[in-house]
Amino acid sequence: MTVTTNQTVREVLNQITHDPRYKDVMKMEKYDIPQTLLTIASLATFILSCYWYLSDMIPWWLAIAFNIVAVYLAFTPMHDASHRAVSSDNFVNDLLGTAAGQILLPGMNMPAFRAIHMDHHRYVGQEGRDPDCGLVNVPKWAGLSYLMFTDIHWLAWFFKNGRENWSPRIKMYVYVMMATVIGLHAVFLLSPYWAEFLLLYVVPQRLGLGLVAYTFAHIQHPHGMTWENEPFQSTVHIDESSPLRGLMFGQENHHIHHLLPHLPWYRYRKVWDLANGILEKQPIPERGWLKPSAEPIWVPGEEVNAPIEVKVYSIEEVGEGIRSFVFEPTDSDVLLPEGAAGAHVNVFIKEGLIRQYSLVEHDDVRNRYRIAVKCEENGRGGSKAMHQLEVGQVIKIGRPKNNFMLYENAKRFVLISGGIGITPMLAMAHRLIRLGKDFELHVCARNEEAVPFKKELSVSRLAKHVHIHLDQDNGRSALAPETVLANPSHDTQIYICGPGGFMNWLRESAVGLGWHPENIRIESFAAPMAEDVASHPFTVHLAKSNKEVEVKANQSIIDALQHSGVEPSYACMQGTCGTCITGVVDGEVDHRDAFLSETEKAANDQMCLCVSRAKGDRLSLDL
């Protein structure tokens, strides 16, 4: 199970990863200064402490204290290296992670630790699959002292569960690590330096492991919460007032690490600002470093996703064949959820007939939603049924979902609508006015009568931003892309909504004029994100080696490849970093990642191996 199979989290991840600033946040250098310095600091602290003690420069208790600090510091670069978040170069990344890891466990190697830690990320809270479950719910007979033997707990978990799921190569690395640990302990304990070994390494290592396990595992995951069922409740946010919060190397925001594990620890805070601060709106539990939260963890039930019963408050003709509908809850005690600019709702028009419509407005003062629908004579029947609704009629609507987010951090915006595509643009325009942002709203229509919301567009506070483009005699739009989109800028976001051909024309024109694809946002009227679907087994053909690999229904492509002896690179296992992107030679991809753009997914020539699958029975990959 991966976090991106959860519909709610997948929506949040899509909003974060498509923020224009996301690629800068996740960009890694070959030599990352904070990570390199932290690795050097941990190794230097340990080496100097041992030297000073052996040279009678410091007492034994101070040497132990220094080495506990070294163990604590070493964990972060080792941990981040398992996610390839120490260096963009795999060799440098694993070298630094392995070097730091020797302080925690001699013989530690990245393939073994990466496998252990990735299983924790993929199966948080699932007994038998999450190797850290025992660190969260420690045995009562042992208490917190159990955390000092984290490595032994992992080893027991490996023999009980890991061996069944890991590839022969990964298991070999585990056995090598075990042999190294046992061998080194035997050599030193049987040598004349056994006392120094116990004092300078074994004692601080055990105490340091306990501190690491408590800080980075035990307090971070409420017992009984899983990624699969309670994704936002299965990790915590350490309270801002906690005095030791600043010593946690980013893991005070552990929920961010689990959502975007490929980011280095010092960039977690930057994620708070992405997607208009979407994470701050999620039900993430808080606690202190020592003190758990007194508040019970709120877990949304089925009622959160249940449709809301509303009645039609008003209906208004707002253009040729276009009607505006205002809904309010039948129960005055029900508060409509936030409908941000760009959001859409499912409208349950009648039995078996559900359509998606963008919100024109969420009036939170009057507790009402407004949408607009154009009657399509040759449509599938949804718009005709909507136009048959009457004032006072009761129907149901879904809670808002937003896959056309208005990224408010940009300096300037160009909004372009075609026909009924104006609906999300109106919500965006009013939001931008409230924010005091610079924007233009270009409205394209066949003729004067077909201009939707003409009266509203003429209101003074909006009128100065509006440019209306009527079709020419030849039927083509009078909008000239070379004029409207004349000055490409990374500080400007283009939003386009309308018929498919209209959007494709403008997107291609914008790219041709020098706009970066990441600055162009389009909205389609199909359901923008597939609902959860059951996974089925399929075959992967490796084109370069002409090898066939069977992928089970409950197995990722990466897992299947590893079992067959192929070792693709990966970092997050959640479809958010792009490390495992591989070319597709043949077959249709079931894209489940949050990294590739909709255009890249539609091209069907690459995929994220960690979460995406085959729609059919076979895929051919460029491997």
Image (tube, grey):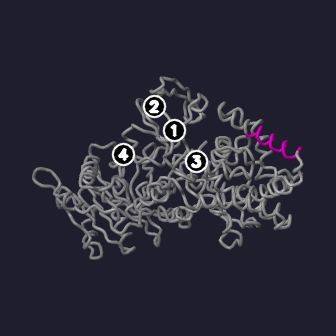
Q: Amino acid at mark 4?
A: Thr
Residue 40 lies in quadrant: bottom right
Quarter of the view holding residue 452: bottom left
Q: CA distance from mark 1 to mark 2?
A: 10 Å
Q: Main secondary structure of the magenta part?
A: helix
* Residue marked by disc 3: 3
Residue lying farthest to the left in this orientation: 473
Q: Quick one: label 4, few (<14), some, or many (20+) residues within 10 Å?
A: few
- The answer to whether residue 412 is above or below residue 582 is below
**Mark 2 or mark 3, which is nearer the start of the sequence?**
3
Q: Is residue 589 left or right of residue 559?
A: left
Dot 4 or dot 3: first in sequence order is 3
Q: Amino acid at mark 3?
A: Val
Cα gap from disc 3 to disc 2, whole angstroms: 24 Å
The magenta-colored residue range is 177-190
Q: CA distance from mark 4 to mark 2?
A: 19 Å
Q: Are marks 1 and 2 in contact (CB under 8 Å)?
A: yes
x%, y% of residue 270? Answer: 52, 64
Q: Residues within 10 Å of mark 3 (few under 14, many from 20)?
A: many
Q: Amino acid at mark 2?
A: Leu
Q: Please state which of the two labelled residues, at mark 1 or mark 4, is closer to the viewer.
A: 1
Say whether residue 31 is visible. Answer: yes
Local secondary structure at mark 3: helix
Left or right, 511 with respect to 472, comes to right
**Residue positioned 70% across, 41% down in the render:** 129
Q: Which mark is residue 621?
A: 2
Would you name the residue on which mark 4 appears? 599
Identified at 56% across, 26% down, the residue is 550
